[in-house]
Image (cartoon, grey):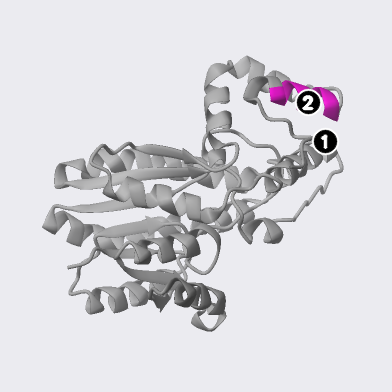
Amino acid sequence: MSTISVVTGANSGIGRATAIHLAAQGHTVYGTVRSVTKATKLQAMADDAGVEVKLVELDVADDQSVREGFDQILSATDGVVDVMVNNAGIGGNATAEECSPALHLEVMNVNLCGAVRCLQAVLPGMRERRRGTVVNVTSVVGRIGALAQSPYVTSKWAFEGFSEELAQEVAPFGIRVAIVEPGITKSAIFAKNIDMPNLTGAYDDAYRRMFQMYAAGLGHATDPFEVAAVIHHAVTTDQPRLRYAVSWASKDIIDGRAAITDEQWVAMGNAANDDEYYDSFQRAFGLDLRDMG
């Protein structure tokens, strides 16, 4: 019997690549999308790969939608989900001062609570069978306080903490948790994530440096199928780890942040101009933000 896997946010980027890649490895894959009629590229790519991704219309931000979607999945699989890939997510740009509580909650509702809803649908069955794997796709910004992305950073740090706690809680039931931390990966999320509130005009430097980080990253962005391969490895390896850094800049930033003090991190914010900031960033992380690929 094939492994039954659910991938949320399967209509683009990492989610789409993961759904197709797992199907190519013989998994029975249910890909959740907010609109089946808009999943034409996913369906075309799956057809080109010679695989099937079973589409389920589901909005991770809505309790009822998740219940109905998972009722459909569990009915089709006799209650079995072997692998749950929580990938669905949205971006969010704003400095802390300029980000409303409502925006923080909106992003958190998708990036954290969406995963909670899905997990609560599959964990009882995994516990009963005493097996299963959860893959939570967080972000490198779940490990570093990236500039001018307060709602996104906050949600991903929360998702990291949630995942670390979850890993201990479900270990006695034979359930594995893997945290996948992508850096910059080719995805539609970047084209959509162009907001710059700048309500006060006081944070021009932060917004500019944030967009420069992504501009540099997009020139080196990793193919999402590389992330999908890491997710497949995390699910199948007999030497599992809790965390997997993948894609451009992820390991450099995670390792670099661990190697500098909190005081050095804060001092970077005092850079007098962009060149000084980019130089200090390069010294800390080995990444030249002026390199556009």
Above or below: residue 267 compared with residue 120: above
Image-based side of 168 in relation to 256, left or right: left
Quadrant into which the C terminus falls:
top right
Above or below: residue 80 compared with residue 89: below
The number of numbered discs placed on residues in the rendered structure image is: 2
Q: CA distance from mark 2 to mark 1?
A: 10 Å
Q: Position of residue 109 (x, y in %)?
A: 50, 58
Q: Amino acid at mark 2?
A: Tyr
Q: Residue at x 84, y 26 (%)?
A: 275
Q: Residue furthest left?
A: 129
Q: Secondary structure at mark 2?
A: helix
Above or below: residue 252 compared with residue 149: above
Q: Residue at x 39, y 50 (%)?
A: 231
Instruction: Please say whether residue 279 is one of the residues in the magenta stretch.
Output: yes
Q: Position of residue 54 (x, y in %)?
A: 37, 76
Q: Nearer the viewer, mark 2 or mark 1?
A: 2
Image-based side of 232 in relation to 123, left or right: right
Q: Residues within 10 Å of mark 2 (few under 14, many from 20)?
A: some
Instruction: Please say whether residue 209 is one of the residues in the magenta stretch.
Output: no
Q: Which mark is residue 205?
A: 1
Q: Position of residue 68 (x, y in %)?
A: 35, 77
Looking at the image, which is closer to me, 277 or 244? 244
Q: Position of residue 44 (x, y in %)?
A: 52, 77
User: Is mark 2 in CB contact (under 8 Å) with mark 1?
Assistant: yes
Q: Which residues are magenta?
A: 274-282
Q: Which mark is residue 277?
A: 2
Q: Which mark is residue 161?
A: none
Q: Amino acid at mark 1?
A: Asp
Image-based side of 201 in relation to 17, left or right: right
